[in-house]
Image: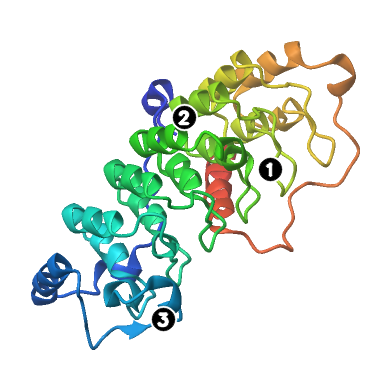
Amino acid sequence: MDDQDSKLGKGQPCADERLDSGLDSLREDECSSLAADTERLSIGSTKLYRNEMRSEMGDEPWKRDRSDDGDTFLHLAIIHEAADYAVKMIKQSVNDPFLNIQNYQRQSALHLAVITEQPQIVDHLLKAGCDPQLVDNQGNTALHIACKRGSLSCFSVLTQSCPVELPTLMSAKNYSGLNCIHLACIHGFFSLVESLIQLGADINAREHCNGRSALHLAVDLQNQELVRLLISLGADVNSLTYGGYSPYHLTHGRQNTDIQRQLYELTAHDLRELPESESEDSDDDPMSEDEEMYDDILLVAQQ
């Protein structure tokens, strides 16, 4: 990780969310047709088929129709950043199940609004009754995605608009076992880490794979600035993984001796010796997209 980015609390944007469902779905002439049809809110297309939500959606065909990738016209408007048309459809769908339809990647309109960095659409969706707890095919809520991509604007809208759901959203783990603070740490977004903790996120929460806390992850990434930040915010230096390893144990064999010295001084005396247990790394389980990225960073840090 670049030192300058670390000091500024910034990381590289995560560009692995897919918008395949709509990016190439419309030609230029079709976009013009979509705009005209959306204006009338009476849209039809031979390339679209009707889904099973007819009884819930009423008689508006634009609410029932889906693309070959499972996208609604609202999804397509968000993907193509046609904000005016998206807002019109949202206003026509307040507290309507239509807002929570998910495409075949299980992305809702809210997921797509965060991925495309449209905080104003996020705000409209939440005020209209969109469910912030829906997860995509990787188990990520919209807040997970905001933390993974470092989207401060979308993060602010989500956290301010969902006070009731916020504790659940911050503690929820995706299918890789990572919650929001883990993702913010892995991707190097310091300001989001601080904000999550200020909002009540558990700084010592452990990911499901090996039981690492945010501090363990920071040590594995050899990110000294992040280690210092987490310690200053109250991270438990004596937290143990499922295999009985403290953050200090993970400094062995690593290049950054400053991290090792800092943690040695803070770690309880009886936790300074390495436990006698098998390696925590497992070659048997397939790695998820997040774990592959994390493993790549870890390998670079070890070189």
Identify the residue under disc 1.
Answer: 207
Secondary structure, mark 3, is: loop
Q: Earlier in the sequence, mark 2 or mark 1?
A: 2
CA–CA distance between discs 2 and 1? 18 Å
Answer above or below: position of 110 versus 193: below
Quarter of the picture holding the N terminus: top left
Residue 114 seen in render: yes
Secondary structure, mark 1, is: loop
Find residue 82 and report its image quarter: bottom left
Which residue occupies 53% across, 41% down?
183
Residue 303 seen in render: no
Label 3 packing within 10 angstroms: few (<14), some (14-19), many (20+): few
In the rendered structure, find residue 53 and report the number of the disc placed on it: none
Find residue 151 and report its image quarter: top left
Residue closest to the eye, 59 or 34? 59
Q: Tell us which disc is closer to us: 2 or 3.
A: 3
Answer above or below: position of 66 versus 258: below
Q: Earlier in the sequence, mark 2 or mark 3?
A: 3
Secondary structure, mark 2, is: helix
Q: Indicate the amino acid at tag 2.
A: Leu
Residue closest to the eye, 302 or 280? 280
In the rendered structure, find residue 51 and report the number of the disc placed on it: 3
Q: Indicate the amino acid at tag 1.
A: Glu
As drawn, is 162 to the left or to the right of 128?
right
Answer above or below: position of 218 versus 115: above
CA–CA distance between discs 2 and 3? 38 Å
Identify the residue under disc 2.
Answer: 192
Q: Indicate the amino acid at tag 3.
A: Asn
Residue closest to the eye, 219 or 153? 153
- Mark 2 and mark 3 in contact? Answer it, CB < 8 Å: no
Which residue occupies 53% across, 53% down?
140
